[in-house]
Image (cartoon, helix red, strand yellow):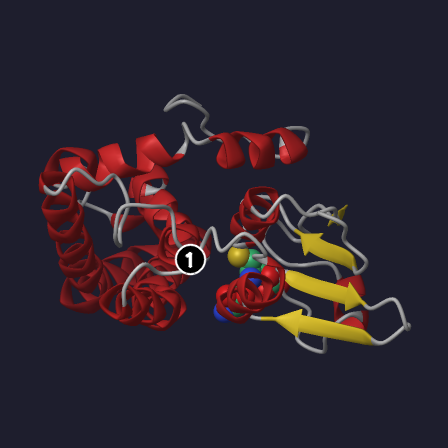
Amino acid sequence: MSQEDIIKLYWLPYSRAQRIVWLLEELNLNYELIKHKRVQSVRAPKEFENVHPLGKSPLLEIIKPNGEKFTLAESGWIVQYLIENYDKENKFKPETSQDANQIGYFLHYSEGTIQPMLVGLLVNHVAATTAPFPARFLVKPIVGQINKGYYGTELLKNLKFLNNIVAEQNKKGSNFLVGDKLSAADIMLSFPILSAFTRDDMSDNYTSLKNDYPELYQYYLNLTKLDGWKKAAEQVKDMQKIAIDGKL
Ligand SMILES: N[C@@H](CCC(=O)N[C@@H](CS)C(=O)NCC(=O)O)C(=O)O
């Protein structure tokens, strides 16, 4: 496919941006990957604020042949935009209107519902592990209660929900979340699902996720066997460890 637009992706290690690398590979697009290390262990560098005021990752810049430039933020919107504008072979076109509805739901569900639970757990984990010495004894049980009463419990509810969907899909012979092919739903949800399985440590006593949600875990391992996933992993292997063919 001839591609006239210049596409630049601003990327951070272990971030939501990896799913955009994966989509760019699936769409067979040429792109420039601007990789930055995180600063203060988790934050994006200040330079990202020159691209978008909130300075998060992923950020995408599209430069048209006439010089017109678009800056795209929010991974759900970036995924939607790339598919709407560059999926010339209709690889990601839903087969039915039911599938379109379900994919649209997951595009928003990913950042709107499941991801905030993981962010809550991460913030609480940082609070519990970085509080100064005497306060730590107080902070730890408090955040433990918050996780038990909300973030952890809600995360488990969401993982059960997804596990049930994958189990139903498996019965129909599909390894994907919607229909029988890779969709924007798989691309978007790969990040929270991967985060849940690879960072069990954050969720206190919820360490048996792989055993409790086996279909979802196998689904995640299957994603790491796809060619597009592997090509995307190749692009970033100098800066992050990433599972390929089910192995880290
Ligand atoms: N809802 C946004 C979230 C973006 C976001 O928070 N990205 C993280 C990386 S996964 C980030 O840039 N963190 C560094 C920081 O906040 O300084 C999206 O889906 O793109």
> Which residue is situated farthest in the right direction here?
67
Q: Nearer the viewer, residue 172 or 197?
A: 172
- Residue type at mark 1: give it: Ala
**The quarter of the picture showing ligand 1:** bottom right
Q: Position of residue 88 (x, y in %)?
A: 59, 56
Q: Position of residue 157 (x, y in %)?
A: 14, 60
Q: Is residue 135 visible?
A: no
- For residue 52, what is the image quadrant? bottom right
- For residue 149, what is the image quadrant? bottom left
Q: Position of residue 92 (x, y in %)?
A: 44, 55
Q: Is residue 173 left or right of residue 192?
A: left
Disc 1 packing (10 Å; few <14; some 14–19; many ≥20): many
Q: Nearer the viewer, residue 125 or 90?
A: 90
Q: Is disc 1 placed on a helix, strand or loop?
A: helix
| Quarter placement of the C terminus | top left
Q: Is residue 111 above or below residue 45?
A: below
Task: Count how many numbered circles sit on residues in the image.
Answer: 1
Q: Is residue 82 left or right of residue 219?
A: right
Q: Position of residue 241 (x, y in %)?
A: 54, 30
> What residue appears at the point 62 percent right and 59 percent down from the top-left corner?
86
Q: Nearer the viewer, residue 246 or 239?
A: 246
Q: Is residue 192 above or below residue 145?
A: above
> What residue appears at the point 18 percent right and 46 percent down from the top-left corner?
166
Q: Nearer the viewer, residue 29 or 97?
A: 97
Q: Is residue 37 above or below residue 81?
A: above
> What residue appears at the point 52 percent right and 62 percent down from the top-left corner?
79
Tell whether circle 1 marks a residue whose Cβ is less than 8 angstroms from ligand 1.
no
Q: Is residue 153 visible?
A: yes
Question: For mark 1, what is the residue?
Answer: 184
